[in-house]
Image (cartoon, rainbow, N blue to C red):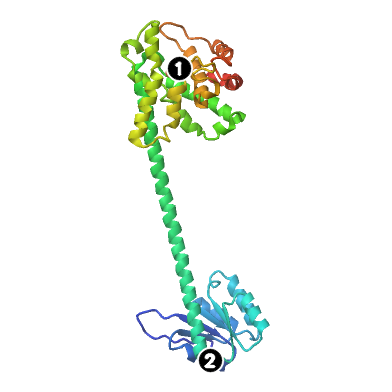
Amino acid sequence: MSAASTENDAGTEPRRKVMIVDDDVTNLLFAKSALSDSYDVYTAPSAAKMFSLLEVVPPDLILLDISMPETDGYEAIRLLKADGRYAGIPVIFLTAMNNPQAEVNGLSVGAVDYISKPFEPELLRKRVEIHITMEEQRLMLERQKKELQQFNSNLMRMVEEKTSRVMELQGAILSTLADLVECRDDFTGGHINRTKEFLRVLAGALMRAGLYPELVAGWDLELLCRSSELHDVGKISIPDAILLKKGRLTPEEFEEIKLHTSYGVQIIDRMAQATHEAGYLRFARIFAGSHHEKWDGTGYPAGLKGSEIPLEGRVLAVCDVYDALTSKRPYKEALSHGTAVSIILEGRGTHFDPLITDVFGSVSREFSF
Ligand SMILES: [Fe+2]
Ligand SMILES: [Fe+2]
């Protein structure tokens, strides 16, 4: 028998290729005649010839004899499975070793099926057809899985890009709005940005300190800081005559100024309604409504007391007051960092949450930048 031979009928559909490996020429020819009508059949009389032939024509399935001189079927399949180029080709053992243990051994080393000789040609055709179909389906599923993974990762990337674009846009809108408010108020130039950076320090320290763990668990520091930019957005509704007044405010004017907290909540509610982004604006709403509340209940707008005041508002209150104390106003000079820190520490338990005041004390150096 020659090293290998092939049969190939011309056709529109590419015919599947089957390789038969057997040292017995009679068996080779018998198996070949059983399959030639349906497949391109390649024959090899030894494992060594099979490997040479594989270099040229990788088949869709291999029928492998077990008892062969030199390299037997077990060793041949081990070599096939160890080679990435051939490991996926289904192998059916075709052998005269007709006992259950040999069958178990054959299947254990990676064969997909085991056919005993002598065999019915029809049975061989059916088994070959089944395993080629199964392999094709497996490959198709693998392809579809890869395509699906590719599709998913593209989709994820698109969603991430869109989300980050929306976040950028939201951030830009918030900053622009905060800038607009601040531009109207000549006296507090930079207040919004400074307060935001103080908040980054104090809220970050609070998170690290492990205080109020259940409340802090829902914090996203970046969103928290960005949201603080809107804490005075309600000032947009305060008349110029009051907001821009040089000199101390009358009690009535101060009452009007105090409304910037409630106005702020209303403005943020309108924004949330219009944009369906209540989640994104949740911190902004809390900051606007609660940054002037005091721990002892003497603050505004609601006169909330202690832990009734949202934690976010209690933290921002410290930052807001620190900036007010260290900033120059038409009616007062800027206080030094040390004096401002002392005033805030004195407000422990009256104006400010005691625990937050302690954390402020431990990081106050970072406020002086
Ligand atoms: Fe305010
Ligand atoms: Fe403020």
User: Residue 273: x and y, percent?
Assistant: 35, 34
Residue at mark 2: C-beta within 8 A of ligand 2: no
| 244 shown above or below 54 | above
Q: What's the residue at 38%, 18% (across, down)?
A: 260
Quarter occupied by residue 47: bottom right
Evaluate whether residue 164 shows in this view: yes
Work out how far the residue at label 1 is from the one at label 2, CA to CA, in angstroms: 95 Å
| 207 shown above or below 67 | above
Q: Name the secondary structure under disc 1.
A: loop
Quarter occupied by residue 337: top right
Q: Which mark is residue 6?
A: none
Q: Name the secondary structure under disc 2.
A: loop
User: Residue 87: x and y, percent?
Assistant: 56, 72
Three-letter code, disc 1 = Tyr
Q: Nearer the viewer, residue 12 or 351?
A: 351
Q: How many marks?
A: 2
Can you say which quadrant of the picture contains the N terminus?
Answer: bottom right
Evaluate whether residue 59 shows in this view: no
Residue depth check, mark 1 versus mark 2: number of the one nearer the observer = 1
Q: Name the residue under label 2.
A: 120
Q: Which of 189 and 302 is in front in this view?
A: 302
User: Residue 8: x and y, percent?
Assistant: 42, 85
Determine the quadrant in which ligand 2 lies.
top left
| 154 shown above or below 277 | below
Residue at mark 1: C-beta within 8 A of ligand 1: no
Q: Name the residue under label 1.
A: 300
